[in-house]
Image (cartoon, grey):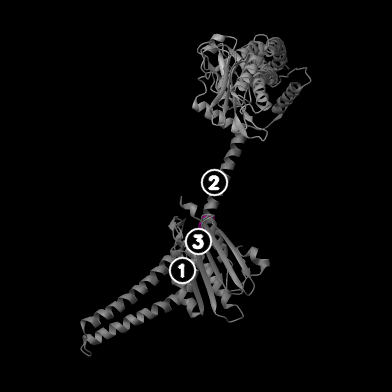
Amino acid sequence: MSNIILKKSGRFNELKFTLIVSFLVLSMFILLVAGSLELYFNFRSQQEAITSRQQFIAHEAANTVGAFIKGKSMVLETTARLGDIVSIGIKEQTLFLERLIGFDPAFRFLCLLNIRKEEVSRVSRLSNTRFRILSAEVKDDIFYQVNQGNTYSGAVYIDEITNEPMIIVAVAVRDVFGDLKGVLAAELNLKFMWNLVGNIKVGNNGLSYVVDSQGSLIAFGDISRVLKGENLLGLLGVREFVEGKECRSPITKGILGTYVVSSFARLENPNWAVIVELPISEAYQSVIQTIIVALLVLILSFILAFVFGIYLSNKITKPIVILRNAAIEIGKGRLDTKIEVNVHNEIGELAAAFNTMVEELKSTTTSIDSLNTEIQDRKKIETELKSAYGQLQAAQAQLVQSSKMASVGLLAGGVAHEINNPLTGVLNNVQLMKMMAEGEKGITYDEIKELLVVVEESALRCKKITQSLLDFSHASRGNFKPVLLNEVIDKVIGLIGHELTLQNITICKVLDPNLPPILGDSQLLQQVIFDIVSNARWAIKNKESKEQGLITIKSEYDKAQNKACVFISDNGVGISKDIQARIFEPFFTTKIVGEGTGLGLSIVYNIIQVHKGTIELESEIDKGSTFKICISVGNMV
């Protein structure tokens, strides 16, 4: 007995390499997924923290700027409430306004308008300066706002003389009863707001600025850009404010052209916004540090995974190489080969099973010849089964044809009687014409023509009855083609209808004119209708009560299931519930010996199965039975 030892093989070096690479890829995948998830959630938490911090700074800055404007508006509102300054003299009004303008250096011009929008008094810090801001349009806007109970704040503009940003602020002047008596308007110098914005602290290197509702720059550290009236709609944060959108603190280009984290806060009055920007490097400094640490951990993990992958691949491939070498030896016919693998795992179990297989291989008696013999035997059985199946199909077709010929025998008497009537008419008319021709009776051309028409109709009726009987008796060839069930029903009723009439049975047809065709065998389907109608006739004849017999044949299209259905109902004896499940079994019959073979409904069931249709029965004792046949119209596709 030879023992197998490890040999070098280039092919299993490929397996070793595959294991190492697979382990590394799997390890890297897990590390990357875990690291990515950690970085993602860290980034989201940092982003939320940055958003909150930016929003806080923006709101603080907005409150500072808003407080500046609101403070000046409150000074005007307090002045307007001190007394009825509109009704006092112009001198007192001017003195009142001079005291107010001297109180706060931010006011450069004060003006008092009466209820008719006329200027009654004004004062200014600049001599020879005309107050040209209060145009008729501006006055209308001022009075509209104060009538709504609002404080008016106009658009920011740059003074042509001083190059300073200015804004018109106006408040209502009301009497003790709350009635509007006039308006106190002031030109407010926003230069003082520049210092406020410049002193707002945004991180270490951030900045802030103020824009109006049109996106124009109002306050910024670089005063030259303010004086130029620069519009900043090109910046995402400014555009979102102007369009009325929510602030998202996105990463975008800032006012200095660098990428920043931007946020803004709206002022209630006027409609301005304070924009704050923080450089990305400062905003995401903690995230960047986390990424660096994660990359270092990833590199270290990769090195450890590589070392462990080499060790693991060696551990796995060594016993596999031994098994490979053993298989080669056994393939050479050396069945005394034994594998020595001293590992206590699945590979050790595989080695033991391999040794067992070799022992059983030596003791087996199965040969290739015996296997070939078994294969030939199975092929022979398969051929015999196919032959038996063909014989079974032939027998079934013969049984259907035999049942049909038996039905033809039943029809013979009724058909002969039905043919006899038109033949008698033909014979009588021929004898009459013969007598006319022999001169025994005068005859005209119209009379001869009328007699010939009657003869022709009678002959055609005989031909139609005979042709229907021949069509019914022909054996089915199994050729499926489009068939109209209404035509099948008409052919069967044409054969058996006269005989049913003689037996006091009425046929009622309710046929759907829009019934679509199905794919089937017309002769087989005629057999189905004939057998069920024949059973209905027997059920009516064997009913104790001698009421008028009725067989109803109805066809309809089931649109929901896309099926053509035929219902055949009778008012015969009915079938009891306990035997309804057996009526389609071969040789099962409720008729007495000699009246039936028990094959009729069995043949009907098989024909419906061939057409991939369904047949169902509903019946009650002494109330009659209804057979429902449905065949899919989809078979036409």
Give me the C-alpha separation between circle 3 and circle 1: 21 Å
Q: In which quadrant of the rendered image does the N terminus lie? A: top right
Please give the label number shown on residue 492: 1
Mark 3: few/some/many CA within 10 Å (<14, 14-19, 20+): some
Q: From the image, tell me which residue sits under label 3.
A: 398
Describe residue 206's horizontal placement relative to residue 465 as left or right: right
Residue 387 in the image: x percent, y percent?
Answer: 53, 50
Which one is in front, 574 or 594? 574
Q: Position of residue 579 (x, y in %)?
A: 66, 66
Residue kind at label 3, given as amino acid type: Gln
Between residue 272 and residue 160, name the one nearer to us. 160
Looking at marks 3 and 1 on the same chain, the residue that comes earlier in the sequence is marked by: 3
SS for tag 1? helix
Q: Which residues are magenta?
A: 392-397
Local secondary structure at mark 2: helix
The amino acid beneath tag 1 is Val
* Front in this rendered view, residue 71 or 193: 71
Residue 279 on image: x %, y %: 63, 12
Which disc is residue 383 wearing? 2
Task: Give the label, 3 or 1, closer to the camera.
Answer: 1
Circles 2, 1 touching at the beta carbon (< 8 Å): no
The stretch drawn in magenta includes residue 353:
no
- The overriding secondary structure of the stretch rendered in magenta is helix
Label 2 vs label 1, nearer the camera: 1
Question: Of tags 3 and 2, which is closer to the observer?
Answer: 3
Relative to residue 128, is residue 596 depicted above or below?
below
